[in-house]
């Protein structure tokens, strides 16, 4: 008879607190080890046969390195969602030892919720997408600093020049100067940051194009299929796929819940109360879905860049039919909610939630076709 031992790990940058839940019910601390591969290997060897071990630790800033290390050693490991770990109401003492013991105890009881762990290709793409997102935020901050600096000193672009266009930047470079050396130095630094941010984004987007082109076949197939949808170009599709991973692990409603676009609810007895969206789950996914949903305020139409995109990617008729159906349904939804008095933000959020259903449908069909192709 196999007697499983459940190992709880409280992981930090330099140390790991280890606890084990024995088959007979005892939960004991094994102390603290350095967060180094050799120390982890020695700890696993001391615990016994790897086939009898079940390890877990909370997702956090240390990423999935420990998961991969344990998997290579043959240990079944799960990465746990920290917010879903049970907490006693009266528990006011938190230490690394107690956290490790609680993880081991809850893991044995089956009370923990594991997160999906991406493979190397998924994580690489996701990190690149998030780096580009961070660069866009930095660009926005740099532009705000420069524009507010110019506003404080009464420098405004002429009529007819839109902000942050090539003409606008040229106007700042040629026509905006100050007699005081300190102000001139500040202007040059602010302007350099704006140019640097733009160059950084261009460089990252080029790298993203190359990463998508070299991605595994299934990953690339799903990214291409999602681009049949209005409002979902390559960057948005890559973000969605990198944040979700395998679509087949979700049902449509659970995917909507994962995005945080579902309404919160507090119902009791015969009363049902729904509030604002939960905003739980993946914020990166929620952002791009809401951005894409704005495209459906316009009437259904197939032409221009969307039509060229569908032709260039040689998408199947089945995928294009789903995308066309999405245009009709989501535009109708937008029109109906707007006519009913909902403001645009609420309407677009509701449309984005339904858009996720169409995204799931296309992605799951594509994944299944790829799996059938591999099995043939």
Image (spheres, helix red, strand yellow):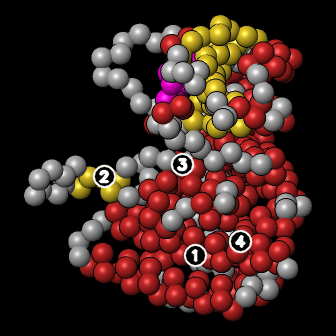
Rendered residue at 39%/26% (across/down): 87
Numbered mark located on residue 122 in the image: none
Q: Please tell me how crowded label 4 is: few (under 14), some (14-19), or many (20+) other residues with Cα within 10 Å.
A: some
Answer whether residue 199 is visible to the viewer in this image: no
Membership of 103 in magenta stretch: yes
Residue on which the image places disc 4: 367
Task: First in sequence, mark 3 or 1: give its number.
Answer: 3
Please state which of residues 350 and 357 is positioned toward the viewer in this rendering: 357
The image shows residue 124 at horizontal and vertical percentages of 79, 47
Please state which of residues 106 and 287 is positioned toward the viewer in this rendering: 106
The image shows residue 99 at horizontal and vertical percentages of 52, 18
Magenta span of residues: 100-106
The image shows residue 350 at horizontal and vertical percentages of 38, 67
Answer whether residue 88 is visible to the viewer in this image: yes
- Disc 3 to disc 1, C-alpha distance: 19 Å
Numbered mark located on residue 264 in the image: 2
Is 61 rendered above or below residue 309? above
- Disc 2 to disc 4, C-alpha distance: 31 Å
Rendered residue at 62%/65% (across/down): 248
Q: Does residue 117 appear to the left or right of 207 in the view shown?
A: left
Q: Mark 4 and mark 3 in contact (Cβ < 8 Å)?
A: no
- Disc 2 to disc 3, C-alpha distance: 16 Å
Q: Secondary structure at mark 4?
A: helix
């Amino acid at each position: 008879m196999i007697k499983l031992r459940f190992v709880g790990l409280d992981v930090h940058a330099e140390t790991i607190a280890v606890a084990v839940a024995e088959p007979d019910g005892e939960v004991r601390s094994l102390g603290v080890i350095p967060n180094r591969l050799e120390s982890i290997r020695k700890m696993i060897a001391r615990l016994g046969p790897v086939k009898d071990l079940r390890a877990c630790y909370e997702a956090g800033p240390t990423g999935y390195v420990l998961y991969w290390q344990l998997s290579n050693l043959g240990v079944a490991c799960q990465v746990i969602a920290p917010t879903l770990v049970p907490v006693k109401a009266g528990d006011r003492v938190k230490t690394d030892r107690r956290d490790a013991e609680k993880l081991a105890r809850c893991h044995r009881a089956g009370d923990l919720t594991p997160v999906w762990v991406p493979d190397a290709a998924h994580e690489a793409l996701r990190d690149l997408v998030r780096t580009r997102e961070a660069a866009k935020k930095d660009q926005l901050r740099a532009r705000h600093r420069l524009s507010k600096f110019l506003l404080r000193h009464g420098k405004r672009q002429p009529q007819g020049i839109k902000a942050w266009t090539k003409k606008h930047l040229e106007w700042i470079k040629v026509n905006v100067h100050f007699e005081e050396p300190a102000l001139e130095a500040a202007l040059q630094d602010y302007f350099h940051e704006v140019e640097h941010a733009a160059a950084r984004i261009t460089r990252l987007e080029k790298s993203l194009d190359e990463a998508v082109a070299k991605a595994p076949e299934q990953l690339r197939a799903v990214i291409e299929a999602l681009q049949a949808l209005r409002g979902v170009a390559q960057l948005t599709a890559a973000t969605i796929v990198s944040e979700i991973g395998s679509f087949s692990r979700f049902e449509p409603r659970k995917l909507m819940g994962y995005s945080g676009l579902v309404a919160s609810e507090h119902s009791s007895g015969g009363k049902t109360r729904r509030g604002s969206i939960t905003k739980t789950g993946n914020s990166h996914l929620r952002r791009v879905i809401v951005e894409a949903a704005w495209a459906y305020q316009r009437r259904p139409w197939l032409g221009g860049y969307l039509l060229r995109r569908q032709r260039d990617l040689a998408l199947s008729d089945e995928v294009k039919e789903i995308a066309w159906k999405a245009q009709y349904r989501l535009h109708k939804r937008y029109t109906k909610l707007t006519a009913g008095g909902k403001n645009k933000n609420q309407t677009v959020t509701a449309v984005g939630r339904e858009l996720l259903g169409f995204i799931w449908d296309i992605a799951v069909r594509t994944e299944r076709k790829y799996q059938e192709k591999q099995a043939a």
